[in-house]
Amino acid sequence: MRKTYHFCLSSHEEVMFRDEADLAMGFNAFAIAALMTESRALGENFLTTHYHSGVQTDSPKEFMFRMRTIYSRYFNAKYDRCGRLGEKRYFSLEVEGFYHMLTMLNYILRQGLHHGLVSTPFEYKFGSVNSFFRSALGKTSNPELIADQFRYRHLPANVSIPPKYRMDKSGLLLREDILDTAYVEELYMTPRNFLFQMNKLTDEKDQYEQQKENDTPPVTMGLLESGVVGFDLRQALIYEQGKVNRSQMTDLELCHVIETQILPRYFKDYQKISVYALPMEKRARICEGLWRESRQTRYQAGLRQSNFVVGTERTHPTATERVTHYLGGKTVTENQLRRCLALL
């Protein structure tokens, strides 16, 4: 008998998804695992350091084993890396009851919002929030599909997906084909309620309804994110209001800068460019340089703000305000640098 689970796999020491192709393969691995274990896929969301998913399955361990193995083999082959990807243990929670399930899905679908990446859940494209009520919400455009003979390039070896599961030009299996959208839409009942659930603020009413439903512990944001090291619940609730720090680089942006602007200087034309193939001491020097640039950007921003306040804004920068080279005027955190450079 299928039971409902929330899964989360995290990797706080390194980025698990370095570009959009990785994020596409992450979902494909999720889809393949669901098909191979005859599981019902309810929803998912992929971030650079972790992913969340809601699944109904009678084989939870096999589902996560297959998904994790498929993606880890892809990532290790692409980046000349070896070993386990992600924490040794993944977070798993069995969910029972309508309100428990609805609250779980709300948290999964709004991950981009809770991590300060977007101002609304629908803006984040690496999750399944835009797969539901597509017609009612005006999301009926048809993506350009890849030719069947090229699908193998975006799937693991010896894995074939029936033609009814479509794949777009980027190599991503279409979420609306994999997810049981009809089942999830029944849970939300109407498009209006779905919009309300995606935009409401977290409050104690969710917990109260779950406690009335059954004796199992209520699903909360803190519980579902307990597998993510360093998760800040207070900050997530601020982000939930749509506050986004556009001046800070995302992990995807930073990885792109590292792999297209910095790493090519260390490799010959015939070599595969990968941060994992670079000696640790060279990664550390890159980290130090980017951190210095980020600190300078913060200093310049503070100086400009100070000059604006006192009414003495300058039109010419001083020697210490030289233009940044790699970050384009955005900032990064030290922990972000370390995980994007795999400084384990």
Image (cartoon, rainbow, N blue to C red):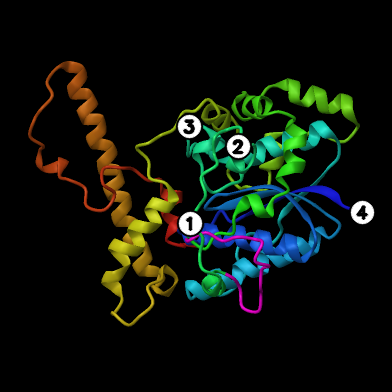
Return the x and y of residue 305 as percentages of the image width and height: 24, 25
Q: Secondary structure at mark 4?
A: loop
Q: Is residue 143 left or right of residue 224?
A: left
Q: Is residue 268 above or below residue 154?
A: below
Q: Secondary structure at mark 1?
A: loop
| Magenta segment | 155-169
Amino acid tagged 1: Glu
Q: Give the residue at mark 4.
A: 1
Please tell me which residue lies in front, 82 or 126. Answer: 126
Q: Secondary structure at mark 2?
A: loop
Q: Is residue 316 above or below residue 339?
A: above
| Comes first in the chain, label 1 or label 3 | 3
Q: Viewer-nearest of labels 3 and 4?
A: 4
Return the x and y of residue 235 as percentages of the image width and height: 54, 31
| Comes first in the chain, label 2 or label 4 | 4
Whether residue 177 is visible: yes
Marks 4 & 1, CB-CB < 8 Å contact? no
Q: Give the residue at mark 2.
A: 135
Question: Which residue ends up furthest to the left in the rendered image?
Answer: 316
Residue 323 covered by magenta stretch: no
Q: Is residue 326 left or right of residue 224?
A: left
Instruction: Identify the residue at image location x=29%, y=80%.
Output: 268
Q: Is residue 244 left or right of residue 64?
A: left
Mark 2–mark 1 distance (CA, rounded to whole Å): 18 Å
Q: Give the residue at mark 3.
A: 119
Q: Viewer-nearest of labels 1 and 3?
A: 1
Residue 139's image quarter? top right
Q: Is residue 122 above or below residue 249?
A: above
Amino acid tagged 3: Ser
Marks 3 & 4, CB-CB < 8 Å contact? no
Q: Viewer-nearest of labels 3 and 2?
A: 2
| Comes first in the chain, label 3 or label 2 | 3
